[in-house]
């Protein structure tokens, strides 16, 4: 239903027959500061000066050479801002806007936010509710990313529960995950362009944080006690990202570079261990895959140090998923044998200990809340 206007009167039910006998009312069309929405039928000139067409038809003096009728302008919609410096008026809304749709999305913030996009013409309005992702609770489980599947791991029994697949809907995998004890989220790196740093929630939902500005598929990652995300590709190129909650530099690069492992060594994951000093720890595989050697990456000097040679342990000594414990041990999952072993830090001394069997995996990385109690005492 179209509306009828005069300078001081608005009647949505009026019936104008059109023609010259209503020119006096045509002259009184509202040409002052009003936002006018005409739903059903209408037209304006190039300068948005006047309404030229009504369903019942009439001649508009401002364009007196044209006559519009009902059939000629049926179902048209016009929205127009009309301005005059001499007359002021409140907005006139001809018809109640269409209904709104509501969309709820996860995002990187910590507070729920609501944004309203008003309707325009025949387009419905939208209410966007952004909700924080659910946090983890520093439980004793380990978390394994394999491809784009997030798995919760019982480190002492080897049992696994899929949390979500895929974690990231785009192309490529997720790798280099770490657990940030400051906010109880996992963070990881996309292994394909745009190579972003992402945040992963307790339910496996993820949101993008920032680009890592690399073309490398980082495969080792963890978050240390200072909420720095550290990632490396096989122990060579590395990056450090600020993940301090509320920091003005959150998600931004702190430092980056390239380190050199001892000759012939390759690492597939690294971890920060509480009480383990300045290092990120890894279990290196030697060139002929016959040994497992604990090495440490100094967060100060950005160099590697060889620490403990455990000799042959299992499979091809490829430890793709490591889990830190707060009692000075690292739990490692060997990709090809499907086993979990426990390794002491140099300060503890001793040999590696078999814990349990587990599914084999590849394209993987592990993470665990480093402040959680030692797994052996909780299962």
Image (spheres, grey):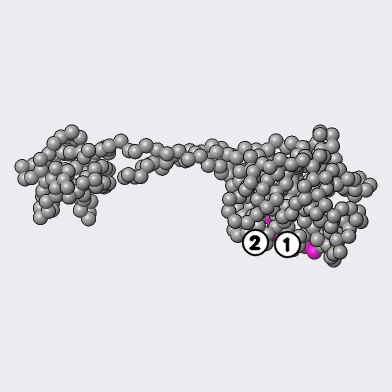
Which residue occupies 56% across, 44% down?
107
Q: Is 7 above or below relative to 272? A: above
C-alpha span from label 1 to label 2: 10 Å
Viewport quadrant of the C terminus: top right
Determine contact: label 1, label 2, CB under 8 Å: yes
Does residue 66 appear to the left or right of 331 in the view shown? left
| Front residue of 163 and 268 | 163
Residue plotted at (74% across, 36% down): 139
**Which quadrant of the structure image shows residue 368?**
top right
Q: Quadrant of the N terminus?
A: top left
Residue at image position (85%, 61%) is: 289
Question: Which residue is disc 2 drawn over?
Answer: 214
Instruction: Look at the image and give the residue range highlighted in magenta.
Output: 254-260
* Spot occupied by residue 378 in the image (x, y as percentages of width and height): 81, 33
Residue on which the image places disc 1: 237
**Residue 117 visible from this viewpoint:** yes
Give coordinates of residue 173: x percent, y percent.
65, 54
- Residue 92 in magenta stretch: no
Q: Is residue 311 left or right of residue 332?
A: right
Q: Main secondary structure of the magenta part?
A: strand
**How crowded is the residue under tag 1: few (<14 C-alpha within 10 Å), some, or many (20+)?**
some
Position of 377 with respect to 194 (left or right) is: right
Q: Nearer the viewer, residue 163 or 294?
A: 163
């Amino acid at each position: 239903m179209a509306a009828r206007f005069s300078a001081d009167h608005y009647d949505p039910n009026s019936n104008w027959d059109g023609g010259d006998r209503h020119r006096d009312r045509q002259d009184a069309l509202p040409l002052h500061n009003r936002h006018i929405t005409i739903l059903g039928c209408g037209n304006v000139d190039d300068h948005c000066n006047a309404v030229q067409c009504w369903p019942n038809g009439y001649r508009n003096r401002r364009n007196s050479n044209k006559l519009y009728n009902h059939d000629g302008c049926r179902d048209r919609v016009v929205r127009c801002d009309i301005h005059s410096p001499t007359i002021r008026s409140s907005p006139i809304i001809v018809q109640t806007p269409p209904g709104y749709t509501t969309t709820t999305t996860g995002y990187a913030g910590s507070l729920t936010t609501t944004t309203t996009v008003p309707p325009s013409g025949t387009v419905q309005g939208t209410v966007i509710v952004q909700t924080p992702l659910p946090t983890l609770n520093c439980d004793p489980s380990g978390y394994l990313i394999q491809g784009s599947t997030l798995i919760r791991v019982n480190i002492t029994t080897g049992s696994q529960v899929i949390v979500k697949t895929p974690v990231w809907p785009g192309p490529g995998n997720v790798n280099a995950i770490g657990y940030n004890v400051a906010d109880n989220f996992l963070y990881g790196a996309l292994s394909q362009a745009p190579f972003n740093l992402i945040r992963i929630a307790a339910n496996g939902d993820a949101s993008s944080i920032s680009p890592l500005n690399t073309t490398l598929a980082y495969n080792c990652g963890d978050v240390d006690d200072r909420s720095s995300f550290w990632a490396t590709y096989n122990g060579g190129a590395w990056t450090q990202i600020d993940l301090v909650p509320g920091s003005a530099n959150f998600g931004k690069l702190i430092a980056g570079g390239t380190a050199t492992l001892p000759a012939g060594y390759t690492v597939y994951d690294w971890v920060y261990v509480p009480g383990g000093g300045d290092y990120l720890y890894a279990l290196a595989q030697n060139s002929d895959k016959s040994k497992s050697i604990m090495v440490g990456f100094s967060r100060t000097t950005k160099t590697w140090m060889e620490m403990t040679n455990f000799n042959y342990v299992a499979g091809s000594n490829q430890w793709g998923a490591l889990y830190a414990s707060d009692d000075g041990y690292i739990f490692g999952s060997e990709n090809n044998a499907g086993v979990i072993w426990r390794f002491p830090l140099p300060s503890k001394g001793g040999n590696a200990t078999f814990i349990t069997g587990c599914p084999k995996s590849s394209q993987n990385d592990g993470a665990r809340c480093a402040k959680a109690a030692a797994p052996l005492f909780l299962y």
